[in-house]
Image (cartoon, helix red, strand yellow):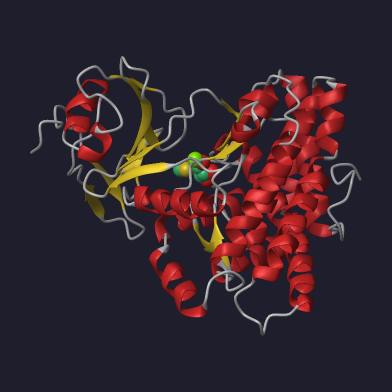
């Protein structure tokens, strides 16, 4: 055992789908604030960036899954270490592959290669202890928190649209020759995390699941929409799209908690938390972010924040227009001359349509299922009912009468 192994968490056990008791061992050292210094001292690449003798570490993880340490030395250098636990941080009885840090490393490095201004720099990936070391972003704010507080984050939506487009273009057959595309797609396989998305975004809120919980006054809306056969059929179609349309590397969990925002041009947006990345439909990333703008919009309406609400109303249009514009600006550099302009037009139309459906699934699952959002949860009860109902009715409309374009006023019928 290495000197960093000062504390081993209790192994967890769980019931498999066949009800067998499965032992989930913790077979690598879990970092603590006091083991960060010896960990860094053992890793020459990191010790060259930060002084292990004077480093101080603070665990700041507030997500569902991982440990996150901000590390600073007395000379002003800093970095972040993020370690995957072999279970869900907020529910240790839920085992989860720690290999997700490998996916996170793939997602960060692919994004940084094509969009360095909007992706943090990966310094090192430690396969043995499931740790990634990356650029410190503590001068930025989590986008969801900024939106919750009423801020208008000018330019952040467009920067995200361009980020998604660059990653999609570069990792698809538009930007990557066939053999490379197939190899990267195989290397990026991420079945366990994709399974979470398939369950949480497309399945659990439609069934009687232990993680479902809604306010009493919202429950009738959920019961009504989840009993509509055409809606269920459309969700099934979208789930199959997510599982089979492996067209480019997508972030896979691009909500406003996966984006940090700042105020200088080179640090306006940084897209983080890429552990759910996989080859999938590009519309999934676009739709997930639009759903999260919908939560912020419903919150701004409930709190009567007129300026922010106006800005959020036009978010989908600005964001999608930036995505489309970036795809067209990259299009002349496509690597396959057999792919002509007509394909770009057809591809963009399909992305636009499926975006609406994916946005709806993300919207409903965040009201009903496991991973709820502060935009809605931190409202007072009456405001919550109004905002959650607005989100659910908008999602219902998206699934049953989808607008054909992501224009202005997408959020209002
Ligand atoms: C068990 S993970 C629950 C959710 O948190 C992540 O951020 C993803 O959104 C996932 O669906
Ligand atoms: Mg995350």
Residue 311, percent from left and from top: 83, 32
- Name the quarter where the C terminus is drawn: top right
Residue at the farthest bottom position: 338
Residue in the foreground of this view, choosing between 72 and 373: 72
Residue at the farthest top position: 74
Q: Residue 352 sits in which quadrant?
A: bottom right
Q: Residue 212 sits in which quadrant?
A: top right
Residue in the foreground of this view, choosing between 285 and 268: 268
Residue at the farthest left position: 1
Q: Can you say whether 228 is above or below 384 in the image?
A: below
Q: Is residue 393 left or right of residue 55?
A: right
Q: Is residue 102 left or right of residue 202?
A: left
Q: Is residue 336 left or right of residue 324?
A: left
Q: Residue 3 sits in which quadrant?
A: top left
Q: How many marks?
A: 0
Residue 47, percent from left and from top: 23, 32
- Residue lying at 56% horizontally and 65% vertically, measured from the top left: 248
- Residue lying at 19% horizontally and 19% vertically, measured from the top left: 53
- Name the quarter where the N terminus is drawn: top left
Q: Can you say whether 19 is above or below 31 in the image?
A: below
Residue in the foreground of this view, choosing between 339 and 60: 339
- Residue 185 shows in this picture: yes
- Residue lying at 45% horizontally and 35% vertically, measured from the top left: 64
Residue in the foreground of this view, choosing between 121 and 108: 121
- Residue lying at 78% horizontally and 73% vertically, measured from the top left: 346
Residue 31, percent from left and from top: 24, 31
Q: Can you say whether 227 is above or below 83 in the image?
A: below
- Residue 9 shows in this picture: no
Residue 298, percent from left and from top: 78, 32
């Amino acid at each position: 055992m290495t000197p960093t192994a000062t504390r081993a968490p209790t192994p967890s056990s769980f019931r498999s789908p066949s009800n067998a008791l499965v032992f989930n061992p913790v077979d690598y050292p879990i970092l603590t604030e006091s083991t960060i210094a010896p960990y860094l001292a053992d890793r020459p690449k990191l010790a060259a960036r930060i002084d292990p003798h004077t480093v101080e570490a603070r665990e700041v993880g507030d997500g569902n899954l991982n440990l996150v340490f901000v590390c600073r030395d007395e000379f002003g250098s800093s970095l972040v270490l993020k370690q995957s636990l072999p279970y869900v941080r907020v529910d240790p009885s839920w085992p989860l592959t720690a290999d997700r840090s490998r996916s996170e490393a793939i997602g960060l490095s692919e994004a940084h290669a094509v969009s360095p201004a909007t992706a943090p720099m990966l310094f090192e990936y430690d396969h043995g202890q499931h740790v990634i070391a990356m650029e410190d972003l503590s001068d930025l704010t989590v986008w969801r928190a900024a939106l919750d507080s009423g801020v208008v984050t000018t330019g952040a939506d467009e920067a995200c649209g361009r980020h998604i487009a660059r990653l999609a273009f570069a990792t698809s057959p538009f930007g990557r020759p066939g053999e490379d595309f197939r190899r990267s797609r195989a290397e990026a396989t991420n079945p366990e995390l994709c399974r979470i998305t398939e369950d949480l975004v497309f399945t659990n809120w439609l069934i009687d699941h232990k993680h479902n919980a809604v306010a009493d006054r919202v429950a009738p809306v959920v019961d009504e929409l989840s009993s509509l056969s055409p809606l269920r059929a459309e969700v099934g179609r979208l789930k199959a799209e997510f599982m089979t349309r492996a067209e480019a590397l997508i972030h896979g969990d691009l909500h406003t908690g996966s984006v940090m925002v700042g105020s200088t041009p080179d640090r306006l947006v940084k897209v983080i938390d890429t552990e759910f990345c996989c080859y999938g439909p590009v519309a999934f990333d676009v739709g997930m972010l639009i759903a999260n703008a919908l939560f912020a919009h419903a919150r701004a309406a409930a709190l009567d924040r007129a300026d922010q609400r106006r800005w959020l109303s036009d978010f989908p249009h600005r964001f999608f227009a930036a995505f489309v514009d970036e795809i067209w600006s990259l299009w002349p550099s496509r690597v396959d001359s057999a792919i002509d302009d007509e394909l770009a037009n057809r591809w963009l139309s399909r992305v636009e349509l499926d975006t609406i459906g994916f946005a709806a699934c993300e919207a409903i699952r965040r009201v009903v299922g496991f991973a709820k959002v502060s935009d809605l949860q931190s409202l007072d009860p009456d405001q919550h009912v109004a905002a959650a109902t607005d989100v659910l009715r908008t999602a219902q409309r998206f699934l049953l009468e989808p607008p054909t374009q992501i224009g202005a006023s997408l959020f209002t019928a």
